[in-house]
Each structure stands twice: as C-alpha cells, then as structure tokens.
Image (cartoon, helix red, strand yellow):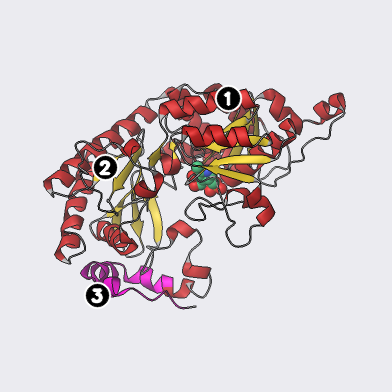
C-alpha cells in the first residue's frame, strides 16, 4: 500500500512542506513502515498525514525525533506519564525488577503492594483484579456486571471511549445510531443502548424502557478526558438513577484514575461508582490495567465464592496480568502520587496553559477557546463557525458532543498539529493534551509561542480567517 493521497490543501501547503523539510528521516521510516503496518502505524491515533514523527528518546516533558528535533510533549504516553518521561525513581524501580525477572509465573509481593496502593487511593476499590490493558479492564467490568445482575444490556454515552473491544467499538467517533462498526456483530450492537452525554431525559427514558440493563459505563469527567464535559449534576443523577434501577455503575478511569487526583475523578468529584476501570498512570507508563469495585461484584472471580454459593465463577486468565515490571513502575508511580503534590502541580500547569492559550487566541482575534479540567487542555477550533465563541466567555457545557468534537475540516486540524511540530510542540490529536507534573514555565512559554506562530502560518496560507 502507498500513503493516502494528500488533499489539494495539504499538498500545496507551506506548513506541510516545512514539516517534511524538518522530518526527512521520519518520512523515510514512514515509507518503509507502509510495507509492514496497515496505514504505517500501530495505533489509529498515531495516523497523521503526510507521515508521523519517529521518536527514539524522551526525558521529562520533552522528546526527540530521529532528525534530532526536540518537542514539548503533550502526548504523555497517551496519558500514562503524569510524572513525565523517564522519572528517575520509576526508572530505577523498573531496572531493578528487570534484573530479578520479567515474569515469575507466581504470585508476587510486588503485585500485593500494587493492589494495596490501588485500594488505598481509589474509593471504589474494595477488591482489585489486574489486567494487561484498559480495554481488557472494561471488558471484564462489563462481564462481571452481567454475572452479578443476571442482566445483559450495556448503557453507554455517545463519544465516550472505553477501548476497542466489540461492545465499545461503535458510537465513539461514528456510528452514533448504534449500528456496529466493521467486524462487530449486530447482536452485540443491539445489546448496547447509547445515550447522549448530559441528557437527563434520555437517560431516564433508557432506564425506564429497558429493564435488562446490567451496567452503565462512562468517562466520569466526559469523553476524551473532558473534551465533552459531563455536568457534575448529571453525574450525581446517573449515580442515583443507576442505584434505583439496580444497574452497576462503572467509571472508566483509565485516563482520569490517579490523574485528576491520587484517588481519580471519583475522589475529586465525590461520586463513587460500583466499579472502576484503571490503566495508564496505574502502571507508570508500562502496559497494565485493572478492574476494581465492590466486593460482592468482584467475588464472582473467586473460586471460594463459587463453592459457597453454588454459582459458576467468572473465568479470567491473562499472561501479563500484574507482570512484575509493570508492577514495579506502578508501585513507584502510585507511591509518588500518594506522597507528593504531583497531581496538583500537573493540574496547576494545565490551568496556566489554558489561560495562556486563551490570551493568545484573544490576541490573534480567533473565535476559538482553550478549556479543560484537571490536567487536560482542549483547543476548540470552532469547526462549525458557531457565533459568539470567545475565549473569555466559553462554556463547553453549552455545546453538545457533535459541536465540541467537530473537526475544523480535518486539513485545518492536521495543519495546526504539523505547524505546532514545526515549532517544537507535539499536541495530542484532540487537539490539546494532558499535562504532567514536570512541565515547566519554559515549556509553557514555548507552547504558547509555538501556538501563536502556528496560527499565523495557518492564516498566511488562508486556512483560517
Ligand atoms: C477512557 C479510556 N478507556 C479505555 C481505554 C483503553 O485502554 P488501553 O489502550 O490500555 O486498552 C482508553 C485508552 O486510551 C481510554 O482513554
């Protein structure tokens, strides 16, 4: 396969030309990767035209590509690295464990310490079961909820992402009518009820119409780490309504867990779910996940419970569950979060960043806004040219998911991200990204300077007014 053909706007773009000039080695690697990986990438979110950057090292808040370009990084290991790249204490813990063995095929004290820390920090974690990823955690949470309630259906919110397994694959970036994405069975899609975020009536209707809902799952601060925020009152109502209807409420805290606060979004917002799914920060930048929750629900994994109740247990295997290297990184990361102000520092940086980007947006006279909660920054680029958008008065709760997630013509967004890279900043595709506890004043200055330069580059080639 060759690369996708560039649109006219991209092939004639001076921004794309500047990006190519700055990243020739990455372009060569991309050409080779086309013969190895479908689309040349190993994660959909790493797909960007004309090619992604190839990086080989990172430290703190920065990373470097194969051409030696340095970037202020707002990917943060897809949200996993709240302590930044290569935190010295986390690295030391990983190195020490590597010398002791990468897989012991046995229970370990390390996994016990890791589980205890999760219990101490996450309010809903009466019991813990480790998995190898966030996707596996949401899959297991759903299965446990079904086994516990004896009901089958899953309630989800449009735009919320919970990994890529069959029950979670549609209604995230498309298929908002609930039809399955390619490869997913109709029968599975029919078992899922989709509700609009913050739609109280829709929620009540769904719960009244279906008496077979086993679980409701959501990203507690809103989809894509609060890009479409969940109103605090809606979250409380969801808690009350699910309790009333005997529906297991699952907070997907794969991103928010240990990030919004050491106790995740649930501790920060004061709403406690029945179960939670965790990953990313949980294992300090290495692969890992966990499903945690009420003892009476989690008991379905316990052979002694099966013996005592005469019910069949829920099976769960997984070669890399609680693998010792991830456990070592996870234990050290959680200990640091528990004993320092790292969460607060990351949140404070993000707040200053949002404010500084908004000042730049205002100075450039753009109908855009930067917003977000906790460590998250989202740049709303007003794809639908909605009137009255100003960084001073922007309230994302006044917009729905179709408006907040609308891409300002994908070429514009691509150009913004490429221009930011040309100017030394790598944004997540939201566009925006999670802050870490090690982003500095200098990073902030560089980011805002790059943003202003990038906006002018877009303007110079007529991409924005
Ligand atoms: C909210 C949320 N849930 C689940 C997942 C899936 O986690 P993983 O990529 O570890 O499978 C992600 C990944 O980005 C996520 O953001």
The answer to whether residue 431 is visible is yes
Q: First in sequence: mark 1 or mark 2?
A: 1
Q: For residue 7: magenta?
A: yes
In the rendered structure, which segment of residues is drawn in magenta?
2-30
Mark nearer the N terminus (1 vs 3):
3
What residue is disc 2 on? 370
Whether the residues at callouts 2 and 3 have beta carbons within 8 Å, the answer is no
Q: Judge by depth and name the residue closer to the eye, 285 or 365.
A: 365
Measured from the top left, where is residue 149 in percent x and y?
Answer: 72, 31
Residue occupied by mark 1: 124
Q: Which badge, 2 or 3, is on the more N-terminal residue? A: 3
Q: Residues within 10 Å of mark 1 (few under 14, many from 20)?
A: many
Element at badge 2?
strand
Task: Using the image, tell me which numbered label, if any, was put on residue 12.
Answer: 3
Q: Where residue 392 appears, x then y in whole percent?
A: 19, 37
Residue placed at 50% from the left, 52% from the top? 176
**Image side of residue 61 versus residue 266, left or right:** left
| Mark 3, other Cα within 10 Å: few <14 / some 14–19 / many ≥20 | few
Secondary structure of the residue carrying numbered label 3: loop
| Residue occupying image coordinates x 59% and y 43% | 193
Classify residue 129 as left or right of residue 256.
Answer: right
Residue 16 in the image: state x and y as whole percent. Answer: 27, 69
């Amino acid at each position: 396969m060759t690369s996708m053909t560039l649109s006219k706007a991209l092939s004639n773009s001076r921004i794309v030309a500047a990006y190519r000039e700055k990243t020739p080695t990455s372009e060569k690697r991309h050409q080779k990767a086309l013969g190895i990986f479908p689309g040349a990438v190993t994660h959909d979110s790493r797909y960007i035209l004309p090619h992604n950057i190839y990086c080989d090292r990172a430290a703190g808040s920065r990373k470097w590509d194969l051409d030696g370009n340095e970037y202020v990084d707002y990917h943060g290991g897809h949200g996993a690295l709240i302590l930044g790249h290569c935190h010295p204490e986390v690295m030391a813990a990983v190195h020490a464990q590597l010398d002791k063995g990468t897989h012991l095929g046995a229970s370990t004290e390390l996994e016990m310490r890791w589980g205890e820390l999760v219990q101490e920090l996450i309010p809903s974690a009466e019991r813990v079961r480790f998995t190898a990823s966030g996707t596996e955690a949401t899959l297991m949470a759903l299965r446990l909820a079904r086994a516990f309630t004896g009901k089958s259906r899953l309630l989800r919110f449009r735009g919320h992402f919970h990994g890529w397994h069959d029950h979670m694959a549609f209604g995230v970036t498309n298929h908002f009518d609930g039809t399955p994405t390619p490869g997913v069975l109709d029968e599975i899609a029919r078992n899922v009820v989709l509700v609009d975020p913050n739609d109280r009536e829709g929620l009540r209707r769904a719960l009244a119409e279906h008496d077979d809902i086993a679980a409701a799952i959501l990203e507690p601060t809103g989809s894509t780490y609060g890009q479409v925020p969940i109103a605090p009152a809606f979250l409380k109502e969801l808690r009350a309504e699910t309790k009333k209807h005997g529906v297991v409420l699952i907070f997907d805290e794969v991103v928010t867990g240990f990030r919004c606060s050491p106790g995740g979004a649930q501790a920060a917002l004061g709403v406690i779910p029945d179960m939670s799914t965790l990953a990313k920060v949980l294992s300090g930048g290495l692969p890992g996940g966990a499903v945690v929750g009420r003892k009476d629900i989690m008991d379905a994994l316990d052979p002694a419970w099966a013996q005592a109740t005469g019910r069949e247990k829920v099976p769960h295997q997984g070669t890399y569950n609680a693998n010792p290297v991830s456990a070592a990184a996870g234990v050290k990361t959680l200990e640091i979060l528990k004993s320092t102000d790292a969460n607060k520092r990351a949140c404070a940086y993000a707040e200053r960043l949002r404010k500084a980007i908004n000042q730049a947006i205002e100075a450039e006279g753009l109908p855009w806004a930067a917003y977000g909660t906790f460590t998250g920054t989202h740049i709303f680029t007003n794809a639908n040219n909605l009137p009255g958008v100003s960084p001073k008065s922007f309230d994302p709760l006044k917009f729905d998911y179709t408006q907040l997630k609308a891409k300002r013509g994908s070429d514009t967004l691509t150009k913004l991200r490429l221009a930011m890279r040309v100017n030394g900043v790598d944004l997540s595709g939201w566009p925006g990204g999670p802050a870490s506890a090690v982003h500095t004043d200098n990073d902030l200055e560089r980011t805002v300077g790059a943003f202003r330069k990038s906006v002018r580059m877009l303007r110079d080639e007529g991409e924005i007014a």
